[in-house]
Image (tube, rainbow, N blue to C red):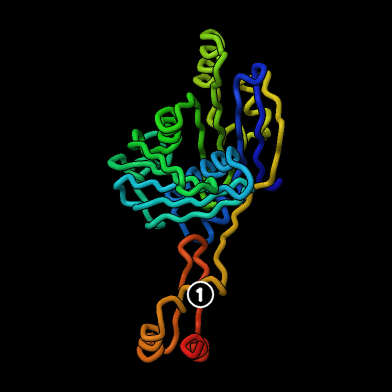
Amino acid sequence: MSDYLIRGTALGGRVRAFAVQTTALTEELSQRHQTTPTATAALGRTAAAGLLIGAMLKGEEHLIIQVKGGGPIGQIVVDANAKGEVRGYVDNPLVDPPLKENGKLDVAAAVGTEGFLYITKDLGLKEPYKGSVPLISGELAEDFTYYFAKSEQTPSAVALGVLVNTDHSILASGGFVIQLLPGLTDEEIGEIEEMLSRIPAFTSMLGGGLNLEEILQTVMPSFQTLDQMDVMFRCKCSREKVESTLISLGKTELKEILEDEGFAEVICHFCNEAYRYDEEDLQRMIDL
C-alpha cells in the first residue's frame, strides 16, 4: 500500500489526531542518501513529523524542520508542505553509533541532546513563523511533544518510529500526533494517557498489520477519520533552478570555473541528485 496520512477527531471533537505511514518514502530517503540504519531512523522520524505538522497547514503553506543536537549526525533538515510532500537530509548519513543495551537503534546518540529543534512555517505572511525548543531527549518524538507544549501551547502526544530490517530495508515507518483540545475532563485525559502508556510501539502495530485508523482507535476507540491523503518524497530541485543559481554567481566566477575545472557539478542536499554542466553549458551561461 502506498504511503498515506489521515486526520480526524475523537471524544466529540475535543481531541484531534493525525497519523502517517511513511514506509516507502523512508526507504527512498535511505536509498537516495545511503544512510546507515540509525541515520535512516533519525531522518525518517523527522520526515514523518514534518508531514504530520504539514497536515496542520493549508494551501501553499510549508515548513522547514532543523534538528541541531550537537551529535555526530550533524544537522537534520526536513522540508514538508500541506500537500503531503516531503524531502530531507542529514549532514552525516554514515553515523553508526552502537546499539542500545536492548538492541534498538540509538538515535539519541547520533542526534545529541545539546541543541535545539527549530521549526519555521511559511504561512504566506510577511514574516515566517519561527519556533524553537531545547532538545530534551534526542529520540525526537519526545522533542516534538515538547515543541507542541512549549512553542504552540497545545498538549500533545507524539509517536514516531522507523523499523529497519537486518538488510537495511524499511519494515515500517511513520507516526502520530494526538492533540488535546479545550473541554476534556481530567478523567478523559487520564484515560488517554493510560492507553498511551500501554499500547505497543507505533511501528510494531503498523508492521503487525494495523492500519492508521485502527492504531489511533487503540488509544481512542471513538476516533473517526475525517480526511485522508497520499504522502510522498518530492524534491523541488530541477536542472533549470540549479542553472539559475550558477548564473547568479556572475560571469567572473563562471569563467574561473570554466578555466579551472572545465565543468560544474552541483549535488542537491535534499535528494542527492547530481547536475552536471559541461564546457558548452558554462559558456552559454557566460554569454547571456
Q: Residue 5: horizontal and vertical position, in percent?
A: 65, 40
- Quadrant of res 15: top right
Q: Is residue 147 left or right of residue 273?
A: left
**Residue closer to the observer: 204 or 245:** 245
Q: Identify the amino acid type marked 1.
A: Ser
- Quadrant of res 188: top right
Q: Element type at marker 1?
A: helix
Q: Residue 23: horizontal and vertical position, in percent?
A: 60, 46
Q: Is residue 217 left or right of residue 188?
A: right
Q: Residue at x 33, y 37 (%)?
A: 134
The residue wearing badge 1 is 244
Q: Is residue 270 visible?
A: yes
Q: Residue at x 65, y 21 (%)?
A: 13
**Residue closer to the observer: 220 or 163:** 220
Q: Is residue 173 visible?
A: no
Q: Residue at x 66, y 36 (%)?
A: 6
Label 1 CA crowd tier, 10 Å (few <14, some 14–19, many 20+) = few
Using the image, determine if residue 132 lies above or below residue 38.
Answer: above
Q: Is residue 37 left or right of residue 212?
A: left
Q: Residue at x 52, y 62 (%)?
A: 271
Q: How many marks?
A: 1
Q: Residue 61: horizontal and vertical position, in percent?
A: 57, 47
**Residue closer to the observer: 158 or 32:** 158
Q: Residue 47: horizontal and vertical position, in percent?
A: 52, 47
Using the image, determine if residue 217 lies above or below residue 126.
Answer: above
**Residue closer to the observer: 129 or 17:** 129
Using the image, determine if residue 160 lies above or below residue 120.
Answer: above
